[in-house]
Amino acid sequence: MIPVTQPYLPERSRLDKYIDGIYERCWLTNNGPLVQELTQRLEAYLGVENLLLVGNGTLALQIAFRTLGIQRPVGKRSAEAITTPFTYIATASAIKWEGIEPVFADIDANTWCIDPERIREKISSRTRALVPVHVFGNSCDVESINKIARQHRLKVIYDASHAFGVKLGKQSLLSLGDASTLSFHATKLFHSIEGGAIIFKRKRDLKKARKLINFGITGPEQIEALGINAKMTEFQAAMGLSVLDEITQNLNGKERVYKTYENLLKAGYYAASVTFQKQHTDIRENHAYVPVLFNDEDTCLKVKAILHQNGYQARRYFNPSLDTLRILTKRKHKCRVSRDISSRILCLPTYATFEDLHIASIARLIRDLSKTTNSIERQSLSGITKAL
Ligand SMILES: *Cc1c(COP(=O)(O)O)cnc(C)c1O
């Protein structure tokens, strides 16, 4: 079975060199030299400041909330954070885990990111933060979100887990909001096996978060804050550095795969009845995912099944729409657009070395199926016409 994605494995000799250093120093964790090196190299590569490496992308969200004080109750009741229902579970579960109430605002039907107009409708006296997601690496409507946040004095924490290396104009998409978080999980474009990062707007937040990820310890016999353990290890940093050394290769591979799918499915011999995500106009994409939208859930499920039969795994990212999960919310939010998109979306297999041959074969299977559905529709339509 060809998986929907495959972790990027760098040259073994490259990784070995970093690991040799760990053995020589016998320094395995607690802000070691490789964690420091990766921090600097990521800041330079991404064009950001105040970057803090942590153990994973979920902790990155939790530490960002804690640093910015989002979890503090409002009076006797829990604070609220407005977020999108169309994302990976971790965005909303991290909010809930910190005792903050996730409030879901529906998404835009074309960009699949949170819709600013829907955010406005959900603001209450308990709202303390907005947690938008640059879903599949597409930029949210950051101008409108910024405006709303300023008007209502809300903090903005972007879950930028999908947006590694994405630029908006000349600026890194990761430098926006009070904080942006990244996941470096093995399946992500850039990874450190497990890992994550927070990019803070302010240096003082970075300093505070540095304490929080190490039990609140500030000196050999000094504990200043209530903290937790969210540190990245030297071995994770070693993998991160090796993957970063080859990032251009990885990005180029992903771009080729994305464009091949797009070229095949949009026009010509393999043209199929599918829709691609509408990208923000000013964006430089990273092509980390290949999500496609079908006309209805039935076609989507049929495509998934036929791909499976032919040895290709496609995943229903993101299904279910999180506003339907009772573990997250008891409110009846009814995010109609998100539920609709969730029901008929598939992410197609992609990784840097994925061969064109397979892409063509997937495109053919999709085309054939959207054609069959169409001809069935035509048949039943002509049946109706005859009956009339
Ligand atoms: C992967 C992901 C996370 C979680 O990151 P982990 O490193 O797996 O904890 C959070 N949000 C989004 C949008 C993700 O895709």
Image: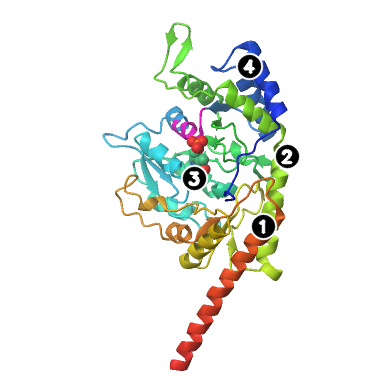
Mark 3 or mark 1: name the one nearer the start of the chain: 3
Give the CA separation, mark 3 to mark 4: 38 Å
Residue positioned 46% across, 67% down in the render: 298
The residue that label 4 is drawn on is 22
Location of the C terminus (image quadrant): bottom left
Mark 2 or mark 3: name the one nearer the start of the chain: 3
Q: Are marks 2 and 3 in contact (CB under 8 Å)?
A: no
| Local secondary structure at mark 4 | helix
Q: Reply yes or no: does residue 18 show up in magenta.
A: no
| Local secondary structure at mark 1 | helix
Numbered badge on residue 248: 2
| Local secondary structure at mark 2 | helix
Give the CA separation, mark 4 to mark 1: 40 Å
Horizontal side, residue 217 vs residue 162: left or right: left
Mark 1 or mark 2: name the one nearer the start of the chain: 2
Write the start and end of the magenta stretch as one range: 55-62
Nearer the observer: mark 3 or 1; the answer is 1
Q: Main secondary structure of the magenta part?
A: helix
Residue positioned 42% across, 53% down in the render: 321
Give the CA separation, mark 4 to mark 2: 26 Å
The residue that label 1 is drawn on is 359
Q: Amino acid at mark 2?
A: Thr
Residue 314: percent from left, percent from top: 54, 54
The residue that label 3 is drawn on is 132
Q: Amino acid at mark 1?
A: Ile
Residue 162: percent from left, percent from top: 57, 43
Q: Amino acid at mark 4?
A: Ile
Q: Are marks 3 and 1 in contact (CB under 8 Å)?
A: no
In the rendered image, the vertical position of residue 78 relative to residue 354, given as above or below: above
Mark 3 surroundings within 10 Å by alpha-carbon count, few (fewer than 14), some (14 through 19), many (20 or more): many
Give the CA separation, mark 3 to mark 1: 32 Å
